[in-house]
Amino acid sequence: MKSPRTFLRTWNRLLEAIMVLAGVLLWGQMVIVNIEICSRYFGRPTIWVAEISSILILWIPFMIGGWVLRREAHVKMDLLLEHLNPRSQALINFITSLIGVIVMLIVTVAGFITAVYWIGNKTPTMLMLPRSPIIAIIFVGSLLFTIQFFIRALENLNQWRSGQVREMSLDKFESSL
């Protein structure tokens, strides 16, 4: 089965590339905020930094959600879960991953509908930026999150079937395919 492995490798590279882009945007945000601070100090404040910065504050978390989930780097409440046997842990993780798929699918659809709704409209600010591309990150980020939850659900299903809890990694998931 070469197709799932190829998909997972491509998927992981995509998430890594998006994470790098999010890091660049974060650095860019820090630079423009510092430019604004210096500009205000010299009596020449900008009109664009606050708006661009607020857009980046929206974009960055939506861009990295799938990457964080893939790394299992999110906050978890697993005090009780750790006391269960490996099969029960995998089953609960599978169920919660399916719930995550459903919830994020709803957010994805809502993000798509909202982005389509705002096509052609502009922000009521000095820059008058188009709203749809700004809002579209909700759709894109939620879609990435949904796909990663689905991958996580499949991995937990495989762990439940085998009765072993393993670290979430590409190599171990691929070997179970």
Image (cartoon, rainbow, N blue to C red):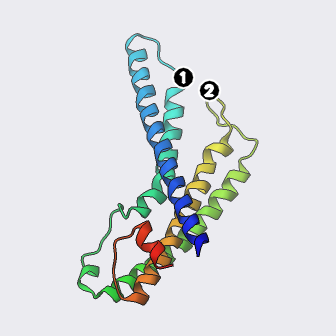
| Vertical side of 32 occupied by 147: above or below | below
- Please give the residue where the numbered disc 2 appears in the rendered image: 126
Name the quadrant of the N terminus: bottom right
| Vertical side of 22 occupied by 50: above or below | above
Looking at the image, do the residues carrying marks 2 and 1 touch, with CB atoms under 8 Å apart?
Answer: yes
Describe the element under mark 1 as helix, strand or loop: loop
- Please give the residue where the numbered disc 1 appears in the rendered image: 47
Position in image of residue 125 (x %, y %): 61, 31
Is 101 left or right of 127, judged from the image as shown?
Answer: left
Position in image of residue 114 (x %, y %): 67, 54
Between 156 and 81, which is closer to the camera in this rendering?
156
Chain-order first, disc 2 or disc 1 = 1
**Alpha-carbon span between mark 2 and mark 1:** 7 Å
Describe the element under mark 2 as helix, strand or loop: loop
Q: Residue at x 43, y 79 (%)?
A: 156
Give the residue type at disc 1.
Ile
Q: Residue at x 51, y 71 (%)?
A: 151
Q: Residue at x 45, y 76 (%)?
A: 175
Position in image of residue 128 (x %, y %): 66, 31
